[in-house]
């Protein structure tokens, strides 16, 4: 994963953490899950800023390489495209999209 995309992703997630209490209607559900499942349950986790900041670009790339698999992909198409044209397109990964110059 390129450095700029990792910084963008990191800042977006940290912004979500900072603003997670902005909508008061969401707080009771989040706290109820902690009471029902326990604070350490996967169903009740609330990541901290320190935990998110500790994730490196290599961690994200390793996760994507492990879990972005063609056997789990779902292909959807909207609009008019010729299948013969699509078959000649090279496959694009999430990393390619994140690091493309179109996003910078």
Image: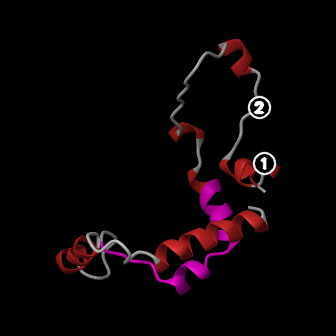
Residue 21 left/right relative to 84: left
Q: Which mark is residue 5?
A: none
Determine whether the residue tagged by mark 1 lies in a helix, strand or loop.
Answer: helix
Circle 1: is it few (<14), some (14-19), or many (20+) Cα within 10 Å?
few
Q: Residue 67: percent from the left, percent from the top?
A: 56, 53
Give whichever of discs 2 and 1 has the lower sequence position: 2
- Using the image, determine if residue 74 lies above or below residue 56: above
Q: Nearer the viewer, residue 57 or 29?
A: 29
Q: In which quarter of the image is the N terminus?
A: bottom right
Residue in front for this viewpoint, 37 or 52: 52
- The numbered dot on residue 102 is 1
User: At 61% across and 76% down in the image, what residue appears?
Assistant: 55
Report the residue marked by disc 2.
Answer: 90
Alpha carbon separation for disc pair 2 and 1: 17 Å
Q: Does the magenta stretch include residue 50?
A: yes
Q: What stretch is highlighted in magenta?
A: 44-65
Number of other residues with Cα within 10 Å of mark 2, as a class: few under 14, some 14 to 19, many 20 or more: few
Q: Residue at x 77, y 21 (%)?
A: 88
Query: For residue 55: magenta?
Result: yes
Residue 101 location (% of width, % of height): 82, 51
> What x and y, as percent, mark residue 81?
65, 16
């Amino acid at each position: 994963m390129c450095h700029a995309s990792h910084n963008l992703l990191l800042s977006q997630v940290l912004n979500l953490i900072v603003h997670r209490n902005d909508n008061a209607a969401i707080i009771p559900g989040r706290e109820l899950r902690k009471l029902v499942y326990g604070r350490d349950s996967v169903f009740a986790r609330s990541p901290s800023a320190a935990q998110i900041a500790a994730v490196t670009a290599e961690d994200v790339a390793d996760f994507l390489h492990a879990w972005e698999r063609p056997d789990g992909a779902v292909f959807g198409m909207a609009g008019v495209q010729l299948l013969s044209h699509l078959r000649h397109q090279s496959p694009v990964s999430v990393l390619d999209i994140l690091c493309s110059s179109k996003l910078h």
